[in-house]
Amino acid sequence: MARSGFLPSQAIDDLNRLSYWVGLPALLFYRIGTAEPDFWAVTGLLFVCTAATLLGIVAAGIGAAAMGLPRRSYGTFIQGVFRGNMAFIGLPVVLYAFSNAGGGAEASALLVFGPMVVLYNVLAVVVLVLSAGRTGHGIVMPALYALVTNPILIASLAGVLLAMAAVPLPDVAARTLSAVGQMALPLALICIGATLYTTRIRGSLRWAFVGAAMKVALLPAIGLALAWAVGLSAVHTQIALILLACPTAAVSYVLARQLRGDEALASSIVVIATVLAVPAMFAVLAVTG
């Protein structure tokens, strides 16, 4: 649709905003708030996702140094390796994959979603700022403001509070949130396809391919090893690997541009990782299914 002009760039931007600011928050708040989740049961899952992300950063730093990336590209490469597109790809894949498996798997994925959003945002700013050798209020404060006003994070926290309070939603609110939330996943998949078409491969293909391969292959491999080490359940292992195999988030390009990183490398990693994520997701579902 994007290629034919049926969805012009302004329409793509508007659909992205609609899904990100309305659809996904409604979905997260409703699903988490009404799922009666077991908060302690997801600690192992959260540990695996967090530890794999941190180890991925270390591996990306070593890889960037080995390839001799310039300082401006260093942080962009690392961000491309660890920052997955959980909102527009990870969440739809998990919810569709476990749609017939009962509410426990979905609730576990949703509970991990909020903390990982915080982790990705904080770490992305840190690696890009350190890479550029820049500090100060002019960078940190806008980043903190963007974090605390993140609609995904706010909806997740509000859903957790609602679940903990065990207060039932009024029918009108439940039906409205359910209906609005149903648009989130189809819109997310349409938007990522359109974004993939409009994003171009530029800069060093070797650096971009290595970064993309590390994102969709190395991080899930690290996650699998950690899951085996801590005795994670089969369902939680599958959720962790799906989330870790997500391609690089398109917002990583936006942040790289804002913090004067390597924009060309960022956009190339997004495109290549999205393509490579298709067989990676198949492999994850086949290995853990």
Image (cartoon, rainbow, N blue to C red):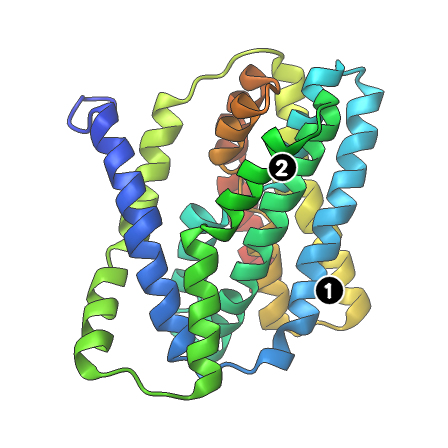
Q: Nearer the viewer, residue 214 or 257?
A: 257
Q: In this rendering, would 168 be left or right of 279?
A: left
Residue 285 drawn at (x, y percent): 54, 57
Q: Amino acid at mark 1?
A: Ala
Q: Which residue is mark 1?
A: 227
Q: Are marks 2 and 1 in contact (CB under 8 Å)?
A: no
Q: Residues within 10 Å of mark 2 (few under 14, many from 20)?
A: some
Quadrant (top left/top right/bottom left/bottom right) for the N terminus:
top left
Residue 134 visible within the image = yes
Q: Nearer the viewer, residue 103 or 184?
A: 184
Residue 264 drawn at (x, y percent): 54, 15
Residue 81 visible within the image = no
Q: Residue at x 57, y 44 (%)?
A: 144
Q: Residue at x 79, y 18 (%)?
A: 67
Question: Which corner quadrant of the image does residue 287 belong to?
Answer: bottom right
Q: Which residue is mark 2?
A: 140
Q: Is residue 281 above or below residue 162?
A: above
Residue 243 drawn at (x, y percent): 56, 54
Quadrant (top left/top right/bottom left/bottom right) for the C terminus:
bottom right
| Lower sequence index among marks 2 and 1 | 2
Q: CA distance from mark 2 to mark 1?
A: 34 Å
Of all residues shown, which one is farthest toward the front?
137
